[in-house]
Amino acid sequence: MRNSVLHRDESGFAMITVVMGFMVVAMLAFLLMSNSERQIEESYRVYREDRVLASAEAQLERYAALLTEDGLYYDVRVDDAERARECTTSSIPASIGVVRQPGQTWADLQCTAWDYEDPGAGWYESPLIAGTTTGERVEIQMEVSPPSGPNPLLVSVTGRNLIGTEIRAVSASMRAESLSEYVRSSNGDLRYGAGADITGKIFANGDLDFTAGNKVHDDIFARDQIGQGSGYTTPIYEDGAVAYVGDPVAGQTPPLYNDFAETSLASFDFNTIWQQTQAVKTAACLGGGLCLNQPGANSYLVEPIVNGTGGAFKIWWNSTSMNPSSCGNVFNDDGHLESGWNSLGTIPIPANGAVWVNGDVIVGDRDEPGTFARIEGSFTIYAGDNGDTIPGLPTSGQQFIMQNKSIMVDVRDGSMPGGTAVAALIASGEAYLRKEAGQASGNHLLLEASLLTQGGVFRGTTCGASSATTEFTFRGSLTSQGTGAMSGTFTPRNYGFDPRLQNIRPPYFPLVNDRWWWQDWRELAIPDWAK
């Protein structure tokens, strides 16, 4: 009897054990399934979030490509992916408060500051990374902050999926390497004399030589050798500057001396500069810029001014070509124009900044000695062309002659350098800095610009002037076929770099190559308007 009861008790325990085992297995299976579902959902959420981030970064790349084609794209058009802009530039009353929608023209407002409207339902669905479901499809909104002083162009992108569950915001600065970023570029050998203390990058498409004691504060580049010319040596490197040399000698090793072949300049061809300059002519004559092609005109006088509505040019033309050796009289003693000059009036600086001139150009002003022409609004003036034929446009091959009063960038924030207005002068021939006869001793000529000479170098010309001492200061960037010829005309001569050119490219100024990029990527907090 007792054995029977024990047997039944053991059978009951066995049954309970089996049932409990099944329950444990079921619970484990349930937990595994739940965990798998959570992992799948989390993976899909990360996947959706990654697609949002990838779309935002793709938009940065797209905008950088547009800027490479047109360095002032942000000033010309409200991009399709931007929020609607409202002009806030106080100096242009007619444009204050004007709102332009995505895809609309912005250039005609001449507005350099703006705020953004809340997007509402007007998000832009990005086609750059395709999706099939609402969770995969991405819409974005973009904001563009124009360059200001030392601050580069900044683009911020906020992206979200169509169901609004994943939102990311990022920003980056835009970079496209321009020749204006080099204080000096030469299509050949380049040598510096005593006392040179140079800020800004240097590029020699040949040898690069320095006099003992010369200092450089930024990287230098030579396709051939550095410091090997007779009587020359290498510079003193300061502020972390290093060299990139194509044909190093013994002892020139990293980290101070590096391989030129690894730089963006290694594939650079000076011939591409002249091809790129045609973009200025096309933009000036076919793209809404200023195209000076007056019948009978062989030379032009262009005076940058600032009037009540912004920057403008006063322009005259003459049927006589300019001769840089004799120069001819432009002004008489009381500052008035000599005979033969015909006024074209006052013309606003074009929104795209492009100016092409079918003739020789004198850039200067009509003020008394010691004053400077001023600019408000960036521009590039191209005198002549490279000889390539553009349908519907004339051909030319003129020279660029600097007037004795020079050009100075207008400083709007009260410091120097400052503001965002930069000027560029491109000569299909040579460029001359001119000193007139009778110019008083002690005058100081100042030129702030990116200067490019297609047919030769940057020269000084006395135009019959006395030997009175005149100081010359150049602040900007200079690109030429060879070295300059200023020593017999101006004493002393001061050369420096305008640091704004590291971030601000003059309109249509040639690029080193077609490489473009964005940098300084960072993630932002989600803006309130996107929540």
Image (cartoon, rainbow, N blue to C red):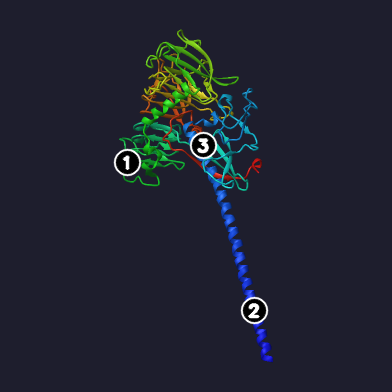
Classify the position of the N terminus by image quarter: bottom right
Q: What element carries label 1?
A: loop
In the rendered view, tell whether residue 270 sits above or below residue 40: above
In the picture, which quadrant includes the C terminus?
top right
Question: Would you name the residue on which mark 3 appears?
Answer: 63
Q: Distance between the residues labelled 2 and 1?
A: 89 Å
Q: Earlier in the sequence, mark 2 or mark 1?
A: 2
Q: Position of residue 325 (x, y in %)?
A: 37, 16
Sequence-earlier tag: 3 or 1: 3
Depth check, mark 2 against mark 1: the one in front is: 2
Residue at numbered disc 2: 15
* In the image, residue 38 above or below residue 74: below
**Crowdedness of circle 3 by 10 Å Cα count: few (<14), some, many (20+)?**
many
Return the mark for residue 247: 1
Q: In which quarter of the image is residue 183?
A: top left
The quadrant in which residue 393 appears is top left
Which secondary structure lies at badge 3?
A: helix
Residue drawn at 55 percent across, 38 percent down:
155
- In the image, is residue 497 above or below residue 442? below
Q: Which mark is residue 160?
A: none
